[in-house]
Image (tube, rainbow, N blue to C red):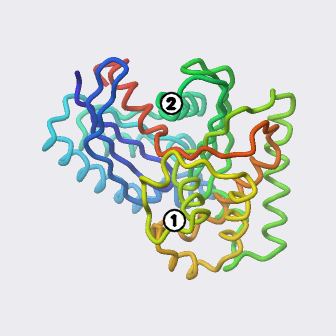
């Protein structure tokens, strides 16, 4: 058994998982999340903003302290879309390494997709599955069965990136929403053309879980009700449309909404809506999972020790 601290630094949030990993068994001890928006402005400038890096470093320092208290033996830090896109990523990696003590990894789009699939599917059983991981800077689609990945693709569409690029108004105008829908359909439709019918669709990460909370009408964010929820596709799509049309203030007032997600959830919800439109679904449901790339990073820390 190895006690692992896995840190996932995405475009919008940074998250920590401390867990014991032993063979095929993982026992979680702590999950934490901070909104640091590392990717703020990266789509426009191609660089990480020093203030954003500072927020990520501060959250990492907090996470490392928590991991030390819990006796983590292995720490693995992985960064994704924002760091992949940034010309000054090495400055970010140097700053994080000075805190963590190990060199962070920047996952390729393919590696990110595979880690998401592994994290999401180890506790849902066998069977052909497509996992959709909607992040702040990118979206990963992965098809496979069990731990066998048959197809993985990463798209440069994420809630932060597309909000900055398309949704300038509050609430978004019909013209802005229409332009974004057209862009998403152009990006996604050709890529999924020819895919086999999807028997099980699993949605992971903060956009999907927030949409699920809205679809369920929760009075607060309730992991026990969200993780493993099976929701009809029309219900999910209605929740997506509702969120993208809301002013940011109304989103912030929703009792389950994280303050740092309210301004970008509309674009993320629209990504989910268009995926459900263009994918060849042979199921009428969305399975919601709180297990995702963070869990995949934890598994990988043991399978690739020393990181």
Q: What percent of the width, then of the height, locates residue 302?
A: 32, 21
> In this orientation, does residue 86 appear?
no
Instruction: Name the one closer to the observer, 253 or 158.
Output: 253
Residue at horizontal 42 percent and vertical 52 percent from the top: 224
Residue linked to disc 1 = 261
- Decide which of tag 1 and tag 2 comes sooner along the chain: 2
Within 10 Å of disc 1 (Cα), the crowding (few <14, some 14-19, many 20+) is many
Q: Quadrant of the C terminus?
A: top left
Give SS at disc 2. helix
For residue 301, above or below residue 67: above
Residue at horizontal 52 percent and vertical 75 percent from the top: 254
Residue linked to disc 2 = 115
| In this rendering, position of residue 28 left or right of residue 181 | left
| In this rendering, position of residue 185 left or right of residue 5 | right
Q: Quadrant of the N terminus?
A: top left
Q: What percent of the width, then of the height, locates residue 32?
A: 32, 52
- Residue 133, quarter of picture: top right
Give SS at disc 1. helix
């Amino acid at each position: 058994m190895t006690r692992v601290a896995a840190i996932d630094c995405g475009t919008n949030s940074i998250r920590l998982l401390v867990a014991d990993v032993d063979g095929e068994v993982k026992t979680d001890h702590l999950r934490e999340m901070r909104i640091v928006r590392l990717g703020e402005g990266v789509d426009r400038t191609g660089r990480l903003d020093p203030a954003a890096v500072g927020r990520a470093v501060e959250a990492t320092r907090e996470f490392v302290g928590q991991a030390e208290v819990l006796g983590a033996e292995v720490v693995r830090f992985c960064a994704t879309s924002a760091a992949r896109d940034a010309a000054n990523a090495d400055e970010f990696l140097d700053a994080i390494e000075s805190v963590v003590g190990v060199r962070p990894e920047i996952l390729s789009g393919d590696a990110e997709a595979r880690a998401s699939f592994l994290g999401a599917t180890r506790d849902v059983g066998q069977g052909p599955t497509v996992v959709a991981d909607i992040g702040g800077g990118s979206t990963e689609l992965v098809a496979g069965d069990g731990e066998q990945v048959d197809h993985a693709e990463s798209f440069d569409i994420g809630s932060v990136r597309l909000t900055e690029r398309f949704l300038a108004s509050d609430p978004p105008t019909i013209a802005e929403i229409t332009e974004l829908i057209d862009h998403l359909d152009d990006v996604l439709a050709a890529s999924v053309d020819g895919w086999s019918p999807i028997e099980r669709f699993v949605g992971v990460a903060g956009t999907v879980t927030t949409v699920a909370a809205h679809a369920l009408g929760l009075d607060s964010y309730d992991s026990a009700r969200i993780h493993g929820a099976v929701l009809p596709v029309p219900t999910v799509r209605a929740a997506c449309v509702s969120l993208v049309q809301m002013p940011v203030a109304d989103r912030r007032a929703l009792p389950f909404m994280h303050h740092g997600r309210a301004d970008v959830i509309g674009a993320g919800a629209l990504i989910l809506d268009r995926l459900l439109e263009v994918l060849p679904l042979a199921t009428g449901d969305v399975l919601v999972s709180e297990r995702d790339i963070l869990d995949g990073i934890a598994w990988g820390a043991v399978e690739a020790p020393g990181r």
